[in-house]
Amino acid sequence: MSENEHIPDSAVIAATPGQLKKTIVMVGMMGAGKTAVGRALAARLGVPFLDSDHEIETAANMTIPEIFERDGEPFFREKETQVIARLLKEERGVLSTGGGAFLAQRNRDLITDDGVSVWLDASLGVLWNRVRHKDTRPLLRTADPRATLNALYDARVPLYAKADLAVVSDGVSSIETMVDKVLEALKQRPDVLDWK
Ligand SMILES: Nc1ncnc2c1ncn2[C@@H]1O[C@H](COP(=O)(O)OP(=O)(O)O)[C@@H](O)[C@H]1O
Ligand SMILES: O=C(O)C1=C[C@@H](OP(=O)(O)O)[C@@H](O)[C@H](O)C1
Ligand SMILES: [Mg+2]
């Protein structure tokens, strides 16, 4: 009798994520949880956490709203592409992008070349509840931010749908449960993560 026969089914240990072979890139709307879930996923995997917005703010020594106000959105988008290209080459880990990053073909190409994209798919109602009390997103500084969010959502969803994987965030009220769901989705991609 092999020693495994003494172990009941319930005690069989599930596969755990091992070595990371490609950077996991979180994409999706503002409020989808890219920063929060990306950070927790990196901690779970024990790999570096990178956030393109954070890198841009640190390099400029300004906040995102200040950059938009002083230099404009096209300047921010230029920096965003440069930062994403640099981070993808520099280090393997989890990279959370800003909500607009995956819209540009050049950024999608960079991400596809060196990473795997994961769309955190949340409904408008959930997104609105997460962003409505925060003033850190310059694109929502409009007369009717809810309508602006709706318009951005409609325009962007077809592009987010090009991501390699999609994980639905609705009905998931904990960041750690979202991490579980992302890891579950990544089981389809042994080229990204070894399982042991
Ligand atoms: N699944 C979730 N359950 C509960 N809160 C969440 C979830 N995902 C994100 N949040 C919260 O929503 C807010 C926006 O998340 P954030 O990570 O900043 O989104 P993004 O980077 O996509 O704009 C944060 O306060 C975050 O903690
Ligand atoms: O959706 C967007 O175009 C933006 C989303 C923001 O990041 P989060 O998605 O992390 O809020 C930030 O990059 C900037 O305000 C623009
Ligand atoms: Mg973010």
Image (spheres, rainbow, N blue to C red):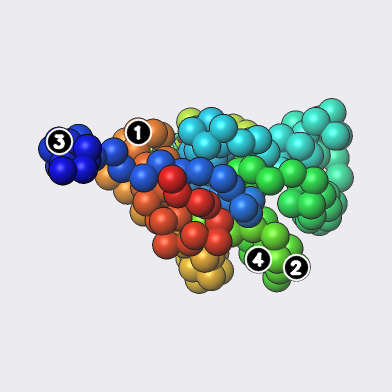
Can you identify the residue that label 3 sits on?
6
Left or right side of 102 for 1: left
Q: Disc 4 designates what residue? A: 112
Of marks 4 and 2, the one in the foreground: 4
Q: Which residue is pictured at 51% across the width and 56% down the height?
A: 118
Q: CA distance from mark 3 to mark 2?
A: 55 Å
Which numbered mark, 1 or 4, is in the foreground of this view?
4
**SS for tag 1?**
loop
For residue 105, side relative to residue 121 (left or right):
right
Amino acid type shown at disc 4: Thr
Q: Residues within 10 Å of mark 2 (few under 14, many from 20)?
A: few
Query: What is the C-alpha distance between the residues marked 3 and 4?
Result: 45 Å
Q: CA distance from mark 4 to mark 2?
A: 10 Å
Q: Amino acid at mark 1?
A: Ser
- Identified at 35% across, 33% down, the residue is 174
**Residue bearing mark 1:** 174
> Can you tell which quarter of the image residue 66 is in?
top right
Residue 58, located in which quarter of the rendered image? Answer: top right
Q: Which residue is mark 2?
A: 106
Q: Mark 1: is the Cβ under 8 angstroms from ligand 1? A: yes
Front residue of 14 and 70: 14
Disc 1/disc 4 C-alpha distance (Å): 28 Å
Q: Nearer the viewer, mark 3 or mark 4?
A: 3
